[in-house]
Structure formats: C-alpha cells, structure tokens
Image (spheres, rainbow, N blue to C red):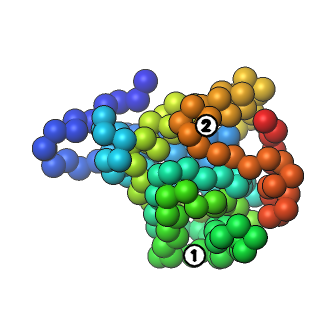
Amino acid sequence: MLEVFPTSHISQLIDLRAIEALDVLGPTIRVLTEPEAEDGSPCVMHGTIPPGVMVPLHSHPDPETFILLSGAAEGLAGADGELSWSRIEPGGIFHVPSGAKHAWRNPSRQPAVMIVVSTSKMGRFFQEVGTPVNPGQQPSGPPSADRIRHLFETTERYGYWIASPDENARVGLVLPFAP
C-alpha cells in the first residue's frame, strides 16, 4: 500500500525520495500527489522510461501533459493514419488531449525522466497496475502472464485502450508482452 498524503487544504513539500516507485511493465511511475476521490482532479506523477523501453500505443479519456526533465524520448501522436514520432528533449513538453492515441519509446542510452500531469483516475490506474520496485531496480525479465492479464483487465475496466501487437508494429513498436 502506498503512503497516503493528506489531500486537505494543507500545502506540503513532497520528497520524491520518499515516494514508492511502481514498475508498470518497464517504465516506472511515482504518484507524487495522492489521487483524490474526484476522477478529474489533477494528479502529478514522476515517470521514468529506461533505455530501450517503450510504452505501447494506447488511449484514454484522461488528458496528460509530460515535461521531460532529463534524457530524451520519442512520443507518438497525431490523428489516425497520421501518427508520427517526435523527439522530446529536456524542457520539452508533450501534451496528449483526452482520447488521443499516443505511445512512447526511449531509443537512447539514458533514462527519460519526466513529470506527468494527469487526473486522479490515471493516478489510481497506475497504483493498481504497478508493482513496487526499489529505486534504480530494473525488472528481472519479461512480465508474467498474470501481470499482463491484470494490466489488460484493469485497462478495460477503466475504459482505456491498448493497441494490438499488429497495430503497435505498424507504428514501429514490438510489444515485449501480448494480450
């Protein structure tokens, strides 16, 4: 269980080192501001995409804004049939509106570290699908069938969408796992 921070009207300093990292099948997320009961309330997270790791093509009704702090990554965005990869470097901001298809990949040799601003619903989703890891710890191998099944079941329950292996391959992504 994650440590709960007060969500009342009290300002607070959040120590990133005290926040548990969650492995989300490769990338890690730290939920910096505890999700509130209202799905649309803002939630701020800290994400890391290790070198060579990708986030498959997906969409959800929650908008997301990514601010790259260090490293470099490529974000896939655009309209159906017109999706293209954009390189994002430190200080770059990548915005994903509600319902937009998008994906990530890190072809570099350094972790891509970013701040993610989204909704409390998205924060709860990551808390539910992620598994705790020690800082700097890499997954020991491919995710288990149970973790993959849990990801896809949770994705469906939240009303989110993950592209098929063929759809991912069409945008240059090979899934390290399959539904």
Question: In the rendered view, does 32 fall on the left or right side of 90?
Answer: left
Q: State the quadrant of the N terminus.
A: top left
Task: Please name the residue shown 52% across and 30% down the image.
Answer: 128
Q: Is residue 80 above or below residue 36?
A: below
Counting from the top left corner in percent of width and height, residue 72 is at 62, 70
Q: State the quadrant of the C terminus.
A: top right
Q: Depth check: give the residue in front, 27 or 170.
A: 170
Q: Is residue 145 above or below residue 66?
A: above
Q: How much space separates mark 1 and mark 2, taking CA atoms?
A: 29 Å
**Contact check, label 1 and label 2, Cβ < 8 Å:** no
Residue lying at the far left in this picture: please name it.
9
Q: Is residue 7 above or below residue 168?
A: above
Quarter of the image holding residue 26?
A: top right
Counting from the top left corner in percent of width and height, residue 131 is at 58, 31
User: Residue under circle 1?
Assistant: 89
Q: Depth check: give the residue in front, 149 or 19.
A: 149
Which class describes the residues within 10 Å of circle 2: few (<14), some (14-19), or many (20+)?
some
Task: Please name the residue shown 59% across and 74% down the image.
Answer: 88
* Kind of residue indicated by mark 2: Thr
Quarter of the image holding residue 71?
A: bottom right
User: Residue under circle 2?
Assistant: 155
Whether residue 53 is visible = yes
Which class describes the residues within 10 Å of circle 1: few (<14), some (14-19), or many (20+)?
some
Counting from the top left corner in percent of width and height, residue 117 is at 41, 57
Task: Please name the residue shown 74% across and 49% down the image.
Answer: 163
Q: Is residue 9 above or below residue 151?
A: below
